[in-house]
Every structure is written in structure tokens, then in C-alpha cells.
Image: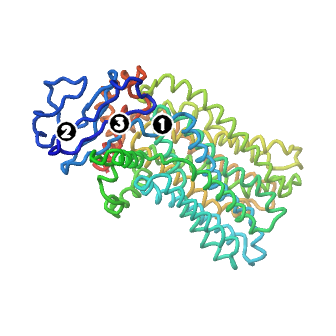
Amino acid sequence: MSDQKPTTPVLEDESRKPSSSSNIVELRELSSQNSSTDRGRPTPRGANPNETTTPTKTTVLAARDGAAIPQPKQHPDGRFELTEEAGYERLGYCWPTWKKWTVLTSIFVVQLSMNFNAAVYANSSGMTAEFGITTPIFKLGQMIFLVAYAFGCELWAPFSEELGRWWVLQISLGLVNLWQIPSALAPNYWVLFVFRFLGGLSSAGGSVTLGMVADLWEPAYQQYAVAYVVFSSVTGSVIAPIFGGFIQEYLSWPWVYWICLMFGGVAQLFHAFTPETRATCILDKEAKRLRKLDPACNIYGPNEIRGNFWSRLSWKEVGVLMWRPYRFLIFEPIVTFLSLFSGFSDALIFLGLDSFGMVMKQWGFKTVAIGLSFIALLIGYLIAYGLFLPRYYFDRKKMNGDETKIDPERRLWLLLFLAPLLPIGLFCFGATSFGPAYGIHWIAPLICLCAIGVANFAIYMATIDYMVAAYGPYSASATGGNGFCRDFLAGISALYVRPFYTNIQPGTKFQLATPTFILGGIGCLVAIPVYIFYKWGFWFRHRSPFAQTLAREREVKKPERQEAMTRSSTPTTTPVQSRANSPSRAEATAEMERVA
């Protein structure tokens, strides 16, 4: 045996090890001297001895109790690559439910801290007197953070694919927390402005957190998790004014940044105890473990095969990956119009940080009371979140592990009824902004704000869900365009909100109502594409090169997927939610590069 090549082990699922030693999968040896033929190669248990196999393909090396186990892929240099199919039992798809939701809860806290950081800046207005700056100059700090945040999310995304989600989020959170210190100690406004810019650019938001959802759940099972992450994102922007009112009233403005530092530190610490979810990083770790157990196995993870980080990720590739979300945003009508709608609804929330206070002051509301009024928006988010869950239950039951069983446009069905709440809420809010002089109770604008909250959550959730279903492996780029629009439009809203609400019919009873009516009219226009895509979305997808490539991949993989799902009916076979039942990410990435 001394002249034989290194062996390659077959992975076992430790949670399903048989009690009998005779059932344990044995290590099999592959002879590179006979790679062109199968002469001399030991026949795996349960395999046909007359069947010819090639070690460079993902084939069945052995079987246990009738369960097929793919072997690692062999490269020309003799090394074996631990593929996602061969190592599926180690991936996040097969983690227990409690472990997945623990990771997801850490992401919930991370998203809360990031969006809290973005919105609570409005409560540090005490610096205007200390630094001698005007309100428009002060608003630049909010604008620059959100605009930098929009670009920062896309900046971090390709690195999370290579370095792993854990390292990227830890580095991102560490930098954001670091920039809070000079912001709180800033000797003048422009020093703070620079560090707000760096804070936004350092924030790895939804592009990474939604990627972690994709690491843990197959597309047919992602909806509950995506809704949870979306809820954390929108909630962070709401708890900022709720707690920010107390900070502004009882503490000096630097405490805004000290509290952000505390919140961010807790989020980073919580996340530090969660495991890596990125498939390639998990496989690298598993390959190292196998080599440690058996140094002769010659098995390596996907990233190890490709070389070190700088050889794997060229600057050209970084540019391609960073450009792709903007390409989707510009050239894909589905992404363009739904992202504009989603961005408009998010911009309204940041507009409300100023405009809502102007309206509520008519009833004598002070800083703390105005902040607490945003609880109405939070109630709207909770209502919308609850409305989506039953829908997801029935969708999941109908899909039964295969997301192709329902049309992607079905994901927009609930939005058909909830999207009108956005313009309706705006028109009603405008009507109630005449104030108590016209016999209007203060609860009326809060009810309108609640309706806007329902619509805002529904728009974000449904558009993300639809893009994931319509673009499959390319959904990261599609949802990246959506997130960019939300952050960018929210950022520039800080520049025009004050003039918008003070320069239109100033001094009249319509001063606060007319701007809101205008926003309601815009809301009607940007909602129209939802109904167009629900009715004719297939027509647009049929003309999209990305969606068509996805459709072809699904057709090719459908028999393999059905076979894998059939095997999953027994305890020893591949779980339905495993990566073995879906196109490998390597294949999807290669095809994406071809289309791009």
C-alpha cells in the first residue's frame, strides 16, 4: 500500500452514526495511476463493480443504509476539493433550528444598532448652538452617513463572500464603534462630519445580513427569516426617535454617540459568539479537520484550492461584483421600479423625523412626547409583520421545498392590498395636520402614521421577497439595488425636508398639509409598478438575461433536485433543505459571470 496515492475520506453525519460498526462508512482509496480506467480501484459498498466512474466528477464513493454520499472532487494536481454537495451535512442548511435562530437573533441586534445609529443623529441637534452652525449644515451629517451607508453595503458584500460573514461583520462593527469615539469628542462640526462619513462607509448592512439568511435557509424556506431581518431593519429607525427624545431632552449631544457606542458594542459582542455561516468557509474548516484526523487524505476546502485571499479576489473581480447591483438597478425594470417605490417609502420615515415634529407641536407636544409618538409607526410594523406570517405558512406548504411551484409574482399578492395604505396614510396625515384649531384630535395623525408603517414594512418585505424568487442566485445583486435606493433616497431627504415643509404656502393653514399631499400623490405614482409586475411580471422576467439563466438552471437541475428530495424521505438521506438539493453556488457564480 505504500505506493498508493493519498486516500480521500467520505464524510459522515455524526448525528446519524449507526450503532453497528459494520455500517460505518470506510475510507476508500483512489489510484491516480488508473484514473482513465477503473481497473484496480476498490469497488465502493453498494456500487456496481462493472460500472465505470471518473474520480474527477462528483460521484458516489460509498453508501450507508441506502444513502448516497457524494465524494469530494479531484483536481488535476491530485488534491480533492470538499464540495458543497459532499459536505452538505456541515453547512448551515442542516443546522438545528435553535442554532439558526440564535444566529439570526444576533443579526437582529446588529441591524437594530446600525439603523439606530443612522436615525438617532437627528437628536444631536444641540451641537448647532455649540458649534455655531445652521440647521441645513447640521442636516448634512445625516445625509452623508446614509449616502455612505448605501455605498458601504455594496462595498462589503464581495469581501463577505471570500472572507466569510463573521469576519466582515466583526470588522464592520468594530470600525463603526471606533468612529463613535471621535464623533463624541469632536472639537468642531467638520471633524464629526468626516467620522459620520466613515461610520456610514464602514457599515455592512443588509447585503451581508440577507446573505447570512441565504446561508442558512434554502429559497423555499427563507421567508420567515427574511421577514425577521426586515423587521429588525425598519425597527431600528423607529426606536431611534423613541429613545432619542429622552437623550435630547436630558443629556448633552455627545451622549448620542456614546449610547451608539454602547449599543454597537453589545451587538458586536453578541455576534462574536455566533458561528460562521458562509458555506465555503465552513468547508475549509471541515477540510482542515479531516486532514488533522488523517493527514494522508489530501482533501481541501474550496477557498484553499483557489489559493490565498488576494489570488482569489482580484481588484477586477471586486469591481465586477460591486458594479452588478447598480447594473441591476439601471437595466432591470423590476429592480428599478420596485426599488424606487421601496426607497420612497423609507425616505418618508426620515422625512418624518422632522416633519412629524412640526405637526405634533400644534398639540403642545415636546421633544420626549414627539419621540414617543413614533410608537404608532412601530405598531404599524408589528401589524404588517403579523399579516405576512400566515401568507408565508401557506406558501411554504404549497412549495413543499420547491420554490418553483409558485410563481414569483405571488409574492406581491399581499402588497396589492397594503401598498395603497402609503398614499392613503399620507393624504390623511396631511388632512390632520391642520391641527387642533380645526377640532382634530392628536390621535388622528398617529393613526395615519400607523397606516404608513404597515405600508412601509409591506413594501420592503414584498419587494425583497419577490426579487429573491425572481432572480434566485442573482438575488443578492437585485436586493442590493433595493437597499441602495432605500439608504440613498433616505439620505438626500435630509437636505430638502425643512425647505419642503416651510417654503410651500408659508404662513397659511396649508403650510404643513400641502407638502404631505404632494408626497401622497408621488406615493400613488410609485405604487403603480406593483400592479404591473403582479399582472405581467412573467413578461419582464422572460426578457431578463439573468432571470432566463436562472430558469434554464432550474430546468437542468429539476430531475436531480426531485431525486434528492425523494431520498430525503428516509432519516439517513439528504435533508430537503440541504445544499445537495439545489444548484451549487460555484455553478451559479460561474453562470452569473458568463451572463455579466
First reached walking from the N terminus: tag 3 or tag 2: 3
1 or 3: tag closer to the N-terminus: 3
Give the spatial CA distance, label 2 vs label 1. 34 Å
Left or right: residue 474 versus residue 463 is: left
For label 3, count other residues whose C-alpha is less than 10 Å away and answer few (under 14), some (14-19) or many (20+).
Answer: many
Residue picked out by circle 3: 11
Q: Quadrant of residue 324?
A: bottom left
Task: Say which of 568 and 346 sits in front.
Answer: 568
Measuring from the top left, give residue 78's x and y in whole percent: 20, 48
Is residue 535 in view? no
Vertical side of 249 occupied by 405: above or below? above
Kindly check if marks 1 and 3 are in contact, taking CB atoms under 8 A apart as contact.
no
Q: Amino acid at mark 2?
A: Leu
Label disc, if present, on residue 30 of the rendered structure: 2
Looking at the rendered structure, the kind of residue marked 1 is Trp
Rendered view: 286 above or below 560: below
Image quarter (top left, top right, bottom left or bottom right) of the N terminus: top left
Distance between the Cα atoms at labels 3 and 2? 16 Å
In the picture, the disc for residue 217 is 1
Q: Is residue 513 visible?
A: yes
| Residue 511 x/y as whole percent | 77, 57
